[in-house]
């Protein structure tokens, strides 16, 4: 406030002098010199006295300081100085010339300067104080100069007293023009420093002994240090790694790409991480898959460092390969499985659509594989599948895909030319190679085994644009090839779809046939050859399907294969067996002594786990004695698990049921069947009977079967006898039972009842001939 008054009086005096000069110019007669001089003199005395008093009150302790330094120190009295002096820490703030601006009590006490007026003074000025630590002040001045010279923080360990040691840090501070501005001196107890140092040493030991391979890299990705695990994993000694670019441990083929990605990812930003998998190279030249992880680390300097870790993922890759092999490859053959086939087929179709190419699918099914698998065992079947995979792989190109879809079904996938004619030709050539190759025998379990290959071919886009449609149509074509004679190939035709649809409709209708009472039993009488006495009947099935109000009979050779494939034959066979037993029991209760009925058993039905229970229930529900039931089986049903089949047949025999081997001579005709299995009756297939009187070879076969069966104690039934001449030949060869149109066609239940009633008195008595139409 006093300074403002002095300034106001000085300005007022200036205006008074100016007015005096103007008055002296215009009014020379006026005398103002004496009053004006008295006013100037009084003001000079007043300002001198005020300045002296202000100097004694405010600046008495700055007698040696320049005015700017004194003003700077005075400015700190109300801000920095108060804050720093209140701090319990070891702290001091100095200007660019080393003058103390503010200091904490702990800092002053370290120099024995407690209570000393230090503001604005240097080390050398403070050294004049009594009882101060002169050596510490000199050392502090030297450290200050080092900090300014190095332009970075400088640390020292300083012993304050026998009990106290401090870690002192001097940090130079620069202004925006990079000129010296302040020097900050801080300190922490040396005990904390030692603890920090111990922790750092422990951390260093932990990193060195860690099971994770790691290294420290500089800004150029050169190795500064690495732990033992890193050295052991890479096979490089420490001196070989030091100051070497980390690219040296990456496989040459991948190092450039990996380093480029590393530089881009980290880019000098602290905390940035980069992770990648690549092949790494050991010191001995060996290569192993590894996962690399790099983290950018910012230290106290301006340069980045990088923490680099390395993991050997060989076992992980092996596990991934095993999983991929399980997911995408067939375990037995090593071929692509169904999942990989459809994935690759989708890729082929996308490529074909883009470049207007053709995709070819060959759907392959092995002929007679089930028979071989059942007769020789599953181990032999597996060996056959392996050899099949080898042959298909040898035939096809590396760019083609060979897959095992399921069981004995394989597929070949090809990408071919833009022209359909070329695609058809290529498919034909590969199909011919496959059928020709499979016409040759396979050597399995020290024997030659012959199988064929039925092949269906579908070509995209003509036969389907989607993977599902293409495979479906190739499958249809394969079934047509199998029906055409096996070991044959067939291109898909659109009319196959209609045939398959008819087949599906037949299956649906067949499922409802029993509920709708559309199935009926027919009986074909059987007669003893020597006296033409009715001795039994074979049970046959007929399906009268109602369509649009009209009843139409579906031939057995049309719906029986559908029933076999769909599994409906088990339910139909159960119905046949139960109904036939009830019918025979009804006839017996009505006084018609028909000795027995013969029921055909399908292979699917015979292999059903509940087959024996099914037979027992049919006999039990109808209360029919087992000796009145005969079951007809085929030779193909005797191939497979011999022990299981033999046990099942023996159980049937133990129940009292007769067993007949149907269509003998058309299948395997193995004499071991007749020797090992409890067969009561052999039925000669009608294909031999038909030409028996015209072809001596058929006649010789029939004679041989009759003689062989009799020698083994088995009865012989001749099927399909239609003429007197055929009957005469069979009677002459002592055939036991005759069945065929010569005596009677198959009859529905009510007509069979009429026949039995008409012959009730003659059953068991000789007769000449039955003339039933």
Image: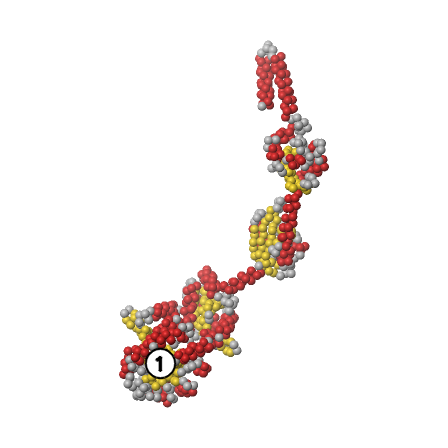
Q: Quick one: SS at disc 1?
A: helix
**Picture layout, residue 485 above or below residue 154:** below
Residue at figure coordinates x 64%, y 22% from the top left = 53
Residue 168 spot, x, y in % from top left: 66, 40
Label 1 CA crowd tier, 10 Å (few <14, some 14–19, many 20+): some
| Residue at point 56%, 54% (across, down) | 275
Query: Which residue does the numbered mark 1 point to in the structure image?
Result: 628
Farthest residue in the right direction? Answer: 135
User: In the rendered image of this protein, does residue 59 appear above or below residue 335?
Assistant: above
Q: Is residue 633 left or right of residue 18?
A: left
Residue 754 in picture, x, y percent from top left: 27, 81
The answer to whether any part of residue 425 appears in the image is no
In which quadrant of the rendered view does residue 677 lie? bottom left
Split into 4 quadrants, where in the image is the N terminus?
top right
Residue 483 position in % (x across, y down): 40, 74
Residue in front for this viewpoint, 463 or 198: 198
Quadrant location of the C terminus? bottom left
Depth check: 631 or 455 in front?
631
* Residue 280 in sight here: yes
Residue 301: image location, x then y, percent: 63, 45
Residue visible at 62% across and 34% down in the picture: 85
């Amino acid at each position: 406030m006093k300074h403002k008054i002095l300034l106001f009086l000085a300005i007022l005096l200036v205006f008074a002098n100016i007015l005096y000069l103007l008055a002296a110019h215009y009014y020379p007669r006026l005398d103002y010199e004496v009053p004006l001089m008295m006013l100037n003199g009084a003001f000079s005395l007043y300002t001198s006295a005020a300045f002296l008093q202000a100097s004694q009150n405010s600046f008495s302790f700055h007698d040696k300081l320049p005015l700017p330094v004194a003003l700077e120190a005075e400015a700190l009295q109300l801000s920095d100085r108060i804050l720093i002096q209140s701090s319990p820490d070891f702290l001091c703030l100095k200007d660019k010339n080393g003058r103390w601006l503010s200091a904490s009590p702990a800092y002053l006490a370290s120099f024995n300067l407690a209570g000393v007026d230090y503001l604005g003074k240097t080390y050398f000025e403070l050294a004049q104080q009594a009882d101060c630590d002169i050596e510490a002040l000199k050392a502090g001045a030297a450290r200050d100069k080092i900090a300014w010279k190095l332009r970075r923080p400088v640390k020292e360990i300083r012993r304050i007293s026998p009990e106290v040691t401090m870690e002192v840090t001097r940090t130079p501070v620069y202004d925006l023009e990079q000129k010296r501005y302040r020097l900050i001196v801080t300190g922490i107890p040396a005990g904390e420093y030692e603890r920090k140092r111990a922790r750092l040493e422990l951390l260093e030991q932990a990193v060195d002994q860690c099971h994770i391979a790691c290294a420290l890299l500089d800004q150029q990705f050169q190795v500064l240090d690495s732990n033992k695990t890193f050295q052991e994993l890479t096979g490089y000694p420490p001196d070989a790694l030091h100051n070497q670019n980390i690219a040296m441990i990456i496989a040459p083929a991948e190092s450039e790409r990996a380093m480029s990605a590393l530089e881009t990812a980290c880019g000098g930003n602290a905390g940035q991480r980069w992770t990648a998998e690549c092949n790494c190279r050991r010191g001995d030249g060996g290569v192993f898959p590894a996962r690399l992880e790099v983290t950018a680390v910012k230290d106290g300097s301006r340069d980045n460092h990088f923490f680099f870790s390395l993991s050997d993922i060989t076992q992980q890759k092996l596990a991934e390969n095993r999983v991929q092999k399980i997911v995408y490859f067939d375990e037995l053959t090593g071929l692509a499985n169904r999942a990989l086939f459809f994935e690759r087929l989708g890729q082929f179709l996308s490529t074909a659509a883009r470049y207007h190419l053709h995709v070819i699918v060959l759907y392959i099914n092995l002929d007679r594989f089930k028979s071989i698998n059942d007769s020789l065992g599953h181990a032999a079947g597996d060996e056959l599948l392996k050899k099949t995979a080898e042959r298909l792989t040898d035939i096809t190109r590396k760019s083609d895909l060979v897959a095992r879809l399921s069981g004995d079904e394989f597929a070949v996938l090809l990408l071919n030319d833009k022209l359909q004619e070329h695609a058809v030709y290529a498919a034909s050539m590969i199909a011919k190679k496959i059928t020709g190759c499979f016409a040759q025998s396979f050597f399995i379990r020290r024997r030659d085994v012959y199988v064929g290959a039925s092949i269906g071919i579908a070509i995209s886009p003509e036969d389907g644009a989607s993977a599902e449609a293409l495979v479906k149509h190739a499958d249809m074509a394969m079934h047509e090839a199998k029906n055409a004679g096996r070991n044959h190939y067939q291109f898909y035709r659109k009319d196959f779809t209609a045939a398959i649809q008819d087949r599906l409709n037949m299956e649906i209708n067949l499922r409802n046939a029993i509920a709708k009472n559309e199935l009926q039993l027919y009986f074909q009488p059987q007669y003893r050859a020597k006296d033409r006495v009715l001795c039994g009947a074979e049970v046959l099935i007929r399906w009268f399907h109602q369509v649009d109000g009209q009843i139409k009979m579906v031939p057995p050779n049309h719906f029986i294969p559908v029933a076999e494939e769909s599994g409906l034959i088990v339910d139909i066979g159960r119905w046949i067996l139960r109904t036939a037993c009830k019918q025979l029991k009804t006839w017996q209760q009505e006084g018609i002594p028909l000795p027995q009925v013969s029921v055909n058993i399908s292979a699917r039905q015979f292999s059903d786990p509940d087959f024996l229970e099914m037979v027992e229930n049919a006999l039990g529900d109808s209360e029919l004695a087992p000796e009145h039931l005969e079951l007809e089986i085929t030779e193909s049903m005797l191939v497979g698990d011999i022990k299981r089949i033999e046990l099942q047949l023996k159980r049937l025999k133990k129940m009292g049921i007769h067993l007949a081997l149907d269509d003998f001579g058309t299948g395997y005709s193995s004499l071991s069947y007749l020797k090992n299995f409890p067969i009561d009756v052999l039925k000669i297939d009608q294909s031999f009977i038909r030409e028996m009187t015209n072809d001596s070879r058929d006649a010789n076969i029939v004679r041989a079967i009759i003689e062989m069966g009799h020698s083994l104690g088995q009865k012989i039934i001749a099927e399909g006898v239609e003429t007197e001449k055929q009957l005469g030949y069979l009677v002459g060869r002592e055939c036991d039972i005759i069945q065929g149109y010569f005596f009677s066609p198959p009859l529905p239940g009510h007509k069979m009842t009429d026949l039995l009633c008409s012959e009730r008195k003659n059953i068991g008595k000789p007769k000449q001939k039955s003339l039933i139409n």
